[in-house]
Amino acid sequence: MTQTNQAIFAGGCFWGMEELFRALPGVVDTEVGYTGGENEHPTYQDHPGHAEALKIEFDPTQISFKQLLDSFFRFHDPTTRNRQGNDIGSSYRSAIFYADEQQKNEAESFINLVNASGRWPKPVVTALEPFTKFYPAEDYHQDYLQKNPDGYTCHYSRGGSYLSQQHPG
């Protein structure tokens, strides 16, 4: 049995992020929830400081953390502070909740790559925050766009891979 890893990303409303990530080969499971905030056991109505986040369980033999970062930076606008589409507030911030120094270093390098790409007219504002605890969102938020195919999302894939822009060495 293959060992899986986890990544925790926030990039606006968790519904749209979940729907795009779940389709990637190597993504084993997704769960929407809250992290990075002030209270324990947050709810949709009470989650001060928490971001709407996506927990991704992935098979590292099929998809790497770097490949997940590549998708993350294409699935949302990483240059808008506390906003994605019509969603405004710190709940909708762009953030990577790193589990260890390796994830933090890969995320920092990837932010530099995205900024150097010139794809965005403004610099990346994605926060790097240490992962502490993930609280699953209410059941009606889980798999929301599977249950409601015409539901709201502001997420879509923007442009080609950043990884193809990397040069060896």
Image (tube, rainbow, N blue to C red):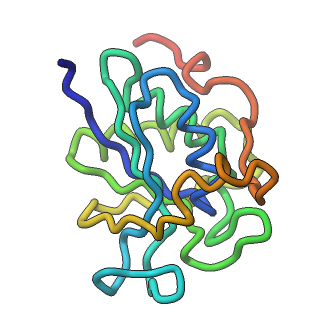
- Point out residue 131 in the picture as x, y percentages from the top left corner: 28, 60
Q: For the C terminus, which image quadrant?
A: top left
Which residue appears at 42% of the width and 54% of the height? Answer: 96
**Which residue is found at the position 38% from the left and 25% from the top?**
64
Vertical side of 121 occupied by 92: above or below:
below
Q: 77 and 57: which one is in front?
A: 57
Q: Is residue 62 above or below residue 76?
A: above
Q: Position of residue 32 (x, y in %)?
A: 47, 58
Residue closest to the eye, 26 or 167: 26
Q: Position of residue 167 (x, y in %)?
A: 52, 14
Residue sitting nearer the eye, 75 or 135: 135
- Identify which residue is drawn at 76% across, 55% down: 154
| Residue 14, placed above or below residue 160 | below
Tell me which corner region of the image, top left, top right, bottom left or bottom right, holds residue 47.
bottom left
Q: Tell me if 27 is positioned left or right of 152 in this view.
A: left
Q: Residue at x 71, y 37 (%)?
A: 118
Q: How far from the left and from the top, in percent, is residue 86?
A: 79, 70
Q: In this image, 71 relative to 77: left or right? A: left
Residue 92 position by quadrant: bottom right
Q: How many marks?
A: 0
Task: Assign the N terminus to one quadrant of the image.
Answer: top left
Q: Which residue is outermost to the top?
A: 168
> Does 19 sit left or right of 26 as displayed?
right
